[in-house]
Image (cartoon, rainbow, N blue to C red):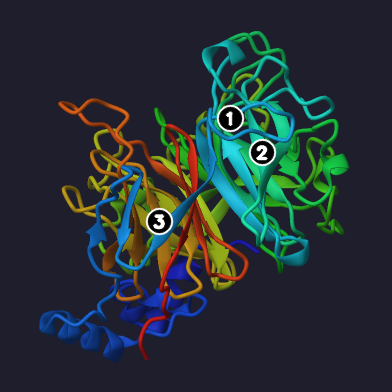
Amino acid sequence: MTLTRRDFARRSALTGAGVALIGSVGALATAPGALATADDTAEDTAEDAAGAPHGPGYGPLVPDPEGVVALPAGFTYRIITHSGVTKLESGEYTPSKHDGTATFEGPRGVTLLVNNHELKGPRSKWKHPVPLTEGLVYDPAASGGCTVVEVHRSGEVAEWVGIAGTSTNCAGGRTTWGTWLTCEENTDRAGENGMTKDHGYVFEVDPYDRRANLDPKPIKAFGRFDHEAVVIDPKRGHAYLTEDDSNPNGLLFRWVPPHGFKHGRGRLRKLADDAGTLQAAKCFDSGGRFVDDLSRATKIGTVYGVDWAEVPDRDGRTVSVREQFDDGDITRARKLEGMWWADGGTYIVSSYARDESPGEPHDGQVWFYDPRRRTLTLKVLLSTGGEYDGPDNITVSPYGGLVIAEDGEGGQHLFGATDSGRTYPIARNECNIGTDAEPEFSEFAGVVFSPDGKTLYASIQDPGIMLAITGPWRRRRH
């Protein structure tokens, strides 16, 4: 059923201005474990003013004598994998350019992680591409892919290839049936940049069953574009996908499964290339006015209604998917990045908007799409020139609120966003890949908690280091 502009305007009028102006990130209080209320926020403010350690975060970051990552006092880190240093089971080095990651509960206390490697172009370009493991290769010319990392209670770590021969594996998403969907943020065709197959697809990787990953097959029903992230609605079966692109800006997509389709292990790879329906989001405000770009939103709490327009040619055979629509057909956004399913919907990151966007410049947005109400609500807005910029990968914390990986300018952080809209630092990258005179710090990526919530995993993309961060995590005070 289509949610028309008139329906949305009438619904907004009936529910009052509070729908469109709910204030600062209040809906994050619905995140798992989030206990804060308006009274808690006032209490935190008072405690901060008094200098007590009960503010929204964990205190200032302490410089790391090893020059890897600064953390609050009481927190520690451990390097799990390090490109060019640690080795796979095959004896080859851990690949570089760590990116999107998910965790899975393995047997006997083991934590399994699937780690993307955002390697673009021919293999000769990279010192440590994803090894071409027999039976797990899609395109032998491509350098990217995923590795599976096994972390034992004893501290022992094992790593092997989950898929190889894919390109620019950026983010992705964990499925409800315990697999990983890895996304190619690259649309090279066979014959371009040395590739032997078309790219721009989503692939499924099973961390539990290596045999299930043999003979990789793209999920062409999800479209061919510069994929960033994907989540699956566990109730309706819809897949939501982000596109990181510009000129023109990218789109938010929804894939509607064919009638009678049931998700499960290995079922996506059996879909016909044109199975289901791929659609792009079209937003309008409470007055029924079409919204051309998410950069038009300037206030936290802004709510847009969402309709969905069908993609004419999901494989982009002659025209890229995002260019198949006229400007009035869909809503665009610059650098749509990470996603995370929680609270009955999905959190969606738009990393920044500047000269390439028609609305107000910003240094990051986090939206929440509610599939039941068919609304998109702005939860976090980073103004230009603020402490953080360029949010990328995202996760919902078991302790309340969000944890966001920064991919911006200057220093790079992991930072939290509370239900009251306040941000606080969790980690700072201290791996200088530049010079003392001109320091340079790579982005954080792959931020995700372990299944038991005790460990926060995150990666520094360059030089390619996966970290396990532990410490005195706490729920918000009640």
Residue labelled with disc 1:
95
Q: Position of residue 88 (x, y in %)?
A: 68, 34
- What is the secondary structure assignment of the residue under circle 3? strand
Task: Give the residue at the far left of this rendering.
Answer: 49
Question: From mark 1 to mark 2, how far is it between C-alphas?
Answer: 8 Å
- Please rate how many residues cluster around mark 2, counting C-alpha atoms within 10 Å: few if below 14, some from 14 to 19, many from 20: many
- Give the left or right position of residue 284, taking residue 49 as reference: right
Point out which mark residue 350 bears. none
- The residue where tag 3 is placed is 404
SS at mark 2 in the image: strand
Q: Residue at x 81, y 39 (%)?
A: 213
In the image, taking residue 202 as reference, residue 217 lies left or right, namely: right
> In the picture, which quadrant includes the N terminus?
bottom right
Q: Camera-side residue: 424 or 318? A: 424
Q: Quadrant of the C terminus?
A: bottom left
The image position of residue 461, as x and y in percent, is: 45, 37
Q: Earlier in the sequence, mark 1 or mark 3?
A: 1
Across and down, in percent, residue 394 comes to 46, 55
The residue drawn where x is 42% and y is 65% is 402
- Number of marks present in the image shown: 3
Q: What residue sits 52% from the left and 76% below the top?
A: 32
